[in-house]
Amino acid sequence: MCLTFLSSIHFYFSSQHEELDDIETQQYGEPLRFSNYSADRAKKTAPVVGLTYDVYDTITQEELDWFLKQKLKVSPGERYQDMKKHWYIHESSWYRRVPELGYDGYGCNYDKCIPECRYYSLNGRIEDSEVIQKHRERQ
């Protein structure tokens, strides 16, 4: 009985925590405690010209888990459309291949993707499994 009681208390507080995270995310883009984490990570140095901050030296597992959860809230079709809009990060975009030379006449650009590009089709999907795999590769 004691274990069941403790489990219900944990569920209550974790669900309230998630609700607060959702509210803060709608208002501020992320839970407020994350900005506290960033401030705690910040290393203040004082070079001759002023202060500099290296805020993202490390990131907590809690933050990584939250970012993944946010990505998984988006449907596979919406993820595809979002990536399709960001032509400059496609593997086949001229911007990724030769940014210093400018547009070379071939590759994805703001107007359209090339047939070899994954995002050439009008509709597509980026499945949860792919999002999770990329998330694991970045850890």
Image: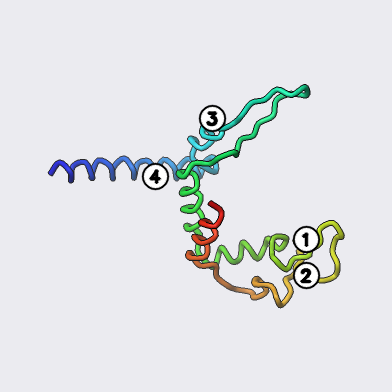
Q: Earlier in the sequence, mark 1 or mark 3?
A: 3
* Residue marked by disc 1: 95
Task: From the image, state whether disc 3 or disc 4 is nearer to you.
Answer: 3
How far apart marks 1 and 4 lie (CA) works out to 39 Å
* Residue marked by disc 4: 18
Contact between marks 1 and 3 (CB within 8 A): the answer is no
Determine whether 80 is above or below 40 in the image: below
Binning the other alpha carbons within 10 Å of mark 4 as few (below 14), some (14 to 19) or many (20 upward) gives few
Q: Residue at x 46, y 45 (%)?
A: 61
Q: Secondary structure at mark 1?
A: helix
How far apart marks 1 and 3 lie (CA) works out to 36 Å
Q: Secondary structure at mark 4?
A: helix
How far apart marks 3 and 4 lie (CA) works out to 22 Å
How far apart marks 4 and 2 lie (CA) works out to 42 Å
Q: Residue at x 51, y 59 (%)?
A: 74
Measured as percent of width and height from the top left, residue 25 is found at 50, 43
Q: Earlier in the sequence, mark 3 or mark 4?
A: 4
Q: Residue at x 66, y 31 (%)?
A: 53
Q: Secondary structure at mark 2?
A: loop
Q: Earlier in the sequence, mark 1 or mark 4?
A: 4
Q: Quadrant of residue 110?
A: bottom right
* 64 to the left or right of 90: left
* Residue marked by disc 2: 107
Task: From the image, state whether disc 1 or disc 4 is nearer to you.
Answer: 1
Contact between marks 1 and 2 (CB within 8 A): the answer is yes
Q: Which disc, if any, is residue 40?
A: 3
Q: Earlier in the sequence, mark 4 or mark 2?
A: 4
Contact between marks 3 and 4 (CB within 8 A): the answer is no
**At label 4, which amino acid type do we have?**
Glu
Measured as percent of width and height from the top left, residue 100 is found at 84, 56
Q: How many marks?
A: 4
